[in-house]
Amino acid sequence: MDIAQLATVVFLLIGGVFLLIGSFGLFKLPDFYMRLHAPTKASTLGIGSILVASIIFYSFKGDGLSIKEFLITLFIFLTAPITAHMLSKAALHVRCEPRADTLNIDKLEKIRNRES
Amino acid sequence: MLETTILIVSALIGLSLLLNLWRFMKGPHMLDRIIALDTMYINAIALIVLLGIFMGSPLYYEGALFIAMLGFVSTSAVCKFILRGDIIE
Amino acid sequence: MDIKHSLWPSPFNFALLLVVWILLTNSFSVGNLLLAVVLAWFIPFLVSRIQSDTSRVKKPGKAVRYVMVLLYDIIVSNIVVARQILGSAHKLQPGFIEIPLDLREPLPITLLASTISLTPGTVSTEVSKDRQCLFVHALNVPDEAALIAQIKSRYEAPLKEIFGC
């Protein structure tokens, strides 16, 4: 039981739990705008953690340092905000109704028309 | 130890895929289905990376990268379609 | 566009392409490094004609510190959001908030919007046409003014320093 294997195991478990929490948020939260939060962030951190585990695993396997998993992490961290932005923009466009007790719900039409 | 962990984490990811599938089936709105599909892409990447660790082969990494790119491009394409489609209407 | 800029487009693009190429090939041999340098210089050179002028990073040291703060925030606030997701959804108070912007150029605004989307609890939704304010949807807003002040001091002020505007 060496330290590298322990680190791999810990990061894998953290990643799995965060992926599950992200999907659970998608499953449970009540309106679309709130559902948008869960997968774009918790899942991003989850996949980052699993890729860190993969980096540690391959680096200590004996084939030298392997850092190309960073590319997937970088790609996902760059694209997650863009996906979230496009989804929320599309939701505003088709007038997706938020939950009734949302703050500033009266400003929705103003946001949709991009007025300051 | 590592094998057991990989099995546990695979079960967690499988469970999240099921939750996503439920949202995909039910999704009151089209956009809910899109976001469920996007999350399924992310979970699939995690599953492939896990398979790579399980098999001890770094080859799966290329597949994971492909899925990451496909997921982003398809999600933004569908969003764009929704935005444009409504403009034409 | 003057000749100096088109020959040496942007150090940031150069560094980014270099790192991405090395990660993609996962090899540190001299030949590969040389190829990476040539590609990282040549591709921005080709693209610089069709690119509009963007703001440049004035203080790289601050930028590195900003990324570190961002990574720390992502991890800490993900735990907070995980707790909110697992707790009761009725206790959450979602809301749209309006953040007045001090930044004016497109690139810093894009970076600020991406930062806001990456830090859990907030998703940037829309920018007003005149770039005066950013609209954000937040998962839980106990205090609207405090959230705006936090985003402005923690993310917008450093970005303003980095791009020197």
Image (tube, helix red, strand yellow):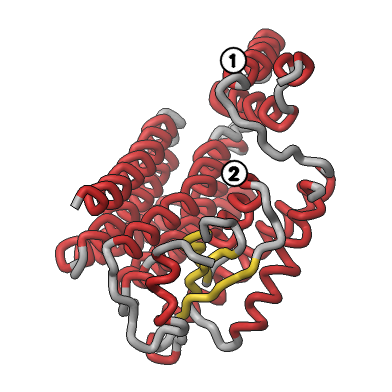
Residue placed at 56% from the left, 33% from the top? A68
Residue linked to disc 2: A56
Callout 1: 10 Å neighbours few (<14), some, many (20+)? few
Tally the marks: 2
Q: Residue furthest bottom?
A: C91
Q: Nearer the viewer, mark 1 or mark 2?
A: 1
Dot 2: chain letter:
A
Cα distance, mark 1 to mark 2? 37 Å
Task: Reply above or below: A31 against C129.
Answer: below
Q: Position of residue A38 (x, y in %)?
A: 42, 67
Task: Reply above or below: A28 against B14.
Answer: below
Dot 1: chain letter:
C
Determine which quarter of the picture holds residue A93. Answer: bottom left
Residue placed at 34% from the left, 56% from the top? B39
Q: Position of residue C126 (x, y in %)?
A: 48, 60
- As helix, strand or loop, the secondary structure at mark 1 comes to helix
Residue placed at 58% from the left, 62% from the top? C116
Q: As shown in the figure, which amino acid type bears the numbered disc 1?
A: Leu
Q: As shown in the figure, which amino acid type bears the numbered disc 2?
A: Ile
Q: Is residue B1 visible?
A: no
Task: Depth check: give the residue in front, B69 or A67.
Answer: B69
Q: Position of residue C14 (x, y in %)?
A: 69, 25
The numbered mark at residue C46 is 1
The C terminus of chain A lies in quadrant: bottom right
Task: Reply above or below: C133 against A9.
Answer: below
Residue placed at 73% from the left, 59% from the top? C69
Q: Position of residue C25 (x, y in %)?
A: 55, 21
